[in-house]
Image (spheres, coloured by chain):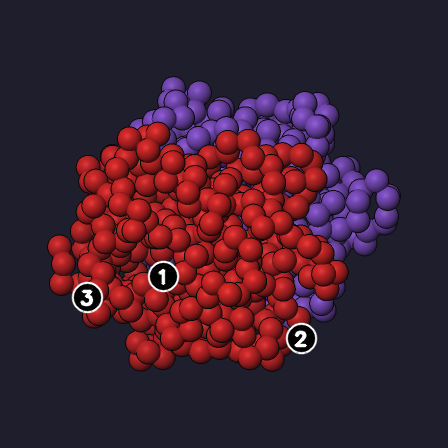
Chain colours: A purple, B red
Amino acid sequence: MLVGKRTWMFEKRPVIISSGVIGGPFEKQGALANDFDRFYDDLWCGEKSYEQAQKKLLEDACQEALNKANLKQEDIQFIFAGDLLNQITSTSFACRSLSIPYFGLFGACATSMEALALAAYVVNSQGAQHVLTGSCSHNAAIEKTFRYPTEYGSQKPPTAQWTVTAAGVGLVASQGEGAVVTSATIGKVIDEGLKDPFNMGAAMAPAAVDTIKAHLTDRNLSTDHYDLILTGDLAKIGRPIALELFQQNKISIQEDIFQDAGLLIYKPDQPIQAGASGAGCSAAVTYGHILKRIQSGELKRVLIVATGALLSPLTFQQKESIPCIAHAVSIEHQGGM
Amino acid sequence: MLVGKRTWMFEKRPVIISSGVIGGPFEKQGALANDFDRFYDDLWCGEKSYEQAQKKLLEDACQEALNKANLKQEDIQFIFAGDLLNQITSTSFACRSLSIPYFGLFGACATSMEALALAAYVVNSQGAQHVLTGSCSHNAAIEKTFRYPTEYGSQKPPTAQWTVTAAGVGLVASQGEGAVVTSATIGKVIDEGLKDPFNMGAAMAPAAVDTIKAHLTDRNLSTDHYDLILTGDLAKIGRPIALELFQQNKISIQEDIFQDAGLLIYKPDQPIQAGASGAGCSAAVTYGHILKRIQSGELKRVLIVATGALLSPLTFQQKESIPCIAHAVSIEHQGGM
């Protein structure tokens, strides 16, 4: 099941039998609005704080996935999930109401694929029949945690990214209809010494390339095995850096199959600087947009490479550089082998 | 491999082939000093901040475990670890220097057993040969995160607990000499509505009892299957509450086999109020003291039940109650079945 150094093959073919994707008002105006299940029209989501709103997004996404699969909370053995808040409280509070045995994860914006890798691993090795997995972010809650309170209206440089308000959840099962999770490659912490928290894309690009390289080596594949290699979230600055690093590493890749969740989710006229980010970005794009395209057969084989910047406001203040990580999970059309 | 609702049995008997336990100056004065590998004589551990000191403790504990097993970083497939800091930065920075594929976890003080459950699961199902797992805490870094800066010298009520300065790490392998990890029961988030962050023991006791009850039900055991059921960290207030909840749940348990890591680690004359806590407490006690007693054959079968309070300072300020969780892992003498 372990191939190479850090890749798991899921030979029993766990299936994402349903998903739930909930967004905020800004995402409703975005490029992938049709791939969400539902939106809230204001950032409060009916709650009293932005943190509780983030919790609500995750709760709703889980409920949506359960409803579509016609399953109840008690049919689910485990949930693997996390978010970007201090002590991932939105996720823990969501799991309080869900009452499902819970593994709390933190991988910053790479949490989505850290969670899916573990969920698929556990289902593949018969440690569960049904597992929920996902992550969430909320623009106001996360900007407040990592940067200035948004109310201050402070300016951001063009390299900054916009935190997505969304939760994306998948329900992974040992059998059923849906896209198949076929392998996962786990990231190492990579830190090239960059220190600018307003340029996460550049900091995270080397981690994405390191994990993709490991994935290809471990599985003995070239990039053209995939119809799409989707990072999340390198955005405008990080993506060309990654392409350059592929060249340096002598990895051949067609530019058009190398896309980024942070560049897909919004429309070009939305004021998002370099692109989108947030633990909910790759989750929402994967469990909404990408799953639809896999299920329709338009995409046969996709590698999702979620990237995370593992800093905190405190490590920035202490003048540390930004350690980054990327986890890759391959998802395939059920018919394909 | 899944038995009952939320318990994994590890039939291939993954082994903790070595461990590393590093403490601070206060732990050096404690009751279990002989069970640590090494201490720092001051809280800075040679670093420039308490957060970096916490990172150092984890790095050292990992290195210690590697050295004892005569293994190198590149022999380890994965590390499962976490801590209590915002964005678990100490763990992520430790994993930067370790350069081992990394799963970041957050389960507050229950992280130690969340991590061991996953590590043992992955080794048991042949997803890795060697996995590092552990957690850490640092009195000054964590008190600063959750409460007042310690420099303020603010008073604490007698129900408060003292955050341990320590890291505890286990090296789990598919074969070798050492204590065997035999099963794990994953916790649900339990919240009985308590709101006092200076009385974590009371808040966490119901989660501990819920997980122990699930463990006994799933495995069809009574408490006398174990020589020791060790919670971490209910301390003076939480332990008697747990004993009362056992009675209410008609679970018979001998009081002397029900012990608590937060009551073992320090001496009675150390000024720790209700007892110890912190993600490093159950980790240090388990990978130091308990492993020694299992290896000597004094203890044959132990259930470690790490408890975590999943709050943040912000959720406290927002007047939320404290959601808690407990994860249980059984560890046995290699000879015993």
Distance of mark 2 from mark 1, alpha carbons? 29 Å
Protein chain holding label 2 = B
Distance of mark 3 from mark 2, alpha carbons? 42 Å
**Coordinates of residue B213 in the picture (x, y in percent):** 31, 36
Kind of residue indicated by mark 1? Thr
Q: Which residue is at 59% across, 23% downward? A: A38
Q: Secondary structure at mark 1?
A: helix
Relative depth, front residue between B109 and B148: B148
Outermost residue toward the front in this view: B269
Q: Quadrant of residue B69?
A: bottom left
Distance of mark 1 from mark 3, alpha carbons? 15 Å
Q: Quadrant of residue B116?
A: bottom left
Instruction: Please report whichever mark, 1 or 3, sits nearer to the chain's N-terminal start.
Output: 1
Labels 1, 3: one chain = yes
Q: Secondary structure at mark 3?
A: loop
Kind of residue indicated by mark 2? Lys
Quadrant that contains the C terminus of chain B: bottom left
Do the CB atoms of the residues marked 1 and 3 lie less than 8 Å apart?
Answer: no
Q: Which mark is residue B297?
A: 3
Circle 3 Cα neighbour tier, 10 Å, few/some/many (<14 / 14–19 / ≥20):
some
Relative depth, front residue between B101 and A54: A54
Residue A67 against residue A162 in the figure, above or below: above
Q: Which residue is mark 1?
A: B286
The answer to whether any part of residue B168 appears in the image is no
Labels 2, 1: one chain = yes
**Coordinates of residue A23 in the picture (x, y in percent):** 63, 30
Instruction: Please report whichever mark, 3 or 2, sits nearer to the chain's N-terminal start.
Output: 2
Q: Which residue is at 42% across, 68% downward? A: B31
The answer to whether any part of residue B11 appears in the image is yes
Q: Which residue is mark 2?
A: B48
Circle 2 Cα neighbour tier, 10 Å, few/some/many (<14 / 14–19 / ≥20):
few
Kind of residue indicated by mark 3? Gly
